[in-house]
Amino acid sequence: MKRTVLITGASRGIGRETAKIFAASGYNVVVNYLESEEQALDLIFKLQKKNHNAIAIKADVSKDIQVQAMIDEAIGKFGKIDVLVNNAGIDLYKQIQDTTYEDFCKVMKINVGGVFNCCRSVVPHMIKEKNGLIINISSIWGEQGASCEVVYSASKSAVIGFSKALKKELEPSNISVEYISPGFVKTRMTKRFIGQEISEELGEIVTPSTIAREVFSCSLKKF
Ligand code: NAP
């Protein structure tokens, strides 16, 4: 039986490249998206043209009912989910005094709540299989903090704490939990910074496919 990966926020950017690399390695691929339907369907069309098994499922990761329905649909189609990549996320570039509590809640609900919702729905299936891998996408700002990105940085730090704790909790069930903390990646999220001087902490600007390879290498260590 082929392995299956579900990638959240795979219509664009890092998630899209991650979907391509898993598909090329023979995985069944579930492409989650929310607003970019055209791009998600275009990706599915391109993957299927290469004879890869891929489906797109629309779901807002911050909504637990939608996430549960997405996981049920993916398992109904492919039988199991071996790898979950929690990639969907949004940024927020504002000084603290301009940030509303609604801004704060929105970022936390998607960046942290989304990771929680997906793990909560997938883990019972992975426990049943006695196998699985969860890869959470944090950020260098979750490690170091960024000026004018306090809430985003906090959400990504939460992803790191969440991942470390879940790793311990799921180790006895043979389920691995990893996280990665990319620096500056050239995607729509970072569009506003292109051409500006980039902080030295970030190192060089990389492409989404570089991060996709890093994500995929976690699966090679596991399987
Ligand atoms: P991106 O190009 O803006 O793509 C974001 C993806 O997340 C899109 O596919 C979007 O889907 C999806 N998404 C957003 N909200 C969603 C929701 N509520 N439910 C489901 N999907 C949702 O961003 P990216 O740069 O590839 O970022 C991917 C991840 O890497 C994020 O978690 C980000 O924080 C992290 N990261 C990025 C960088 C960077 O420099 N770019 C650095 C470190 C970490 P739709 O368009 O279909 O709505």
Image (cartoon, helix red, strand yellow):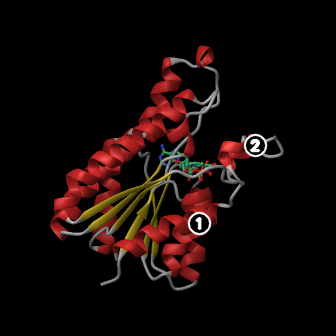
User: Which residue is found at the position 49% from the left and 22% from the top?
Assistant: 102
Mark 2 closeness class: few <14, some 14–19, many ≥20 residues within 10 Å = few
Viewer can see residue 12: no
Q: Is residue 40 above or below residue 121?
A: below
How many marks can you see?
Answer: 2
Q: Residue at x 17, y 62 (%)?
A: 173
Secondary structure under the numbered disc 1 in the rendered image: helix
Q: Nearer the viewer, residue 94 or 61?
A: 94
* Quadrant housing the N terminus: bottom left
Of residues 43 and 142, the one nearer the viewer is 142
- Judged from this view, the residue extending furthest toward the top is 97
Please name the residue that numbered disc 2 is placed on. Answer: 198
User: Of the residues shown, which amino acid type is indicated by label 1?
Assistant: Glu
* Residue positioned 48% across, 40% down in the render: 156
Nearer the observer, 39 or 14 = 14
Report whether 158 appears left or right of 148: left
Q: In the shown orientation, is residue 57 left or right of residue 46?
A: left
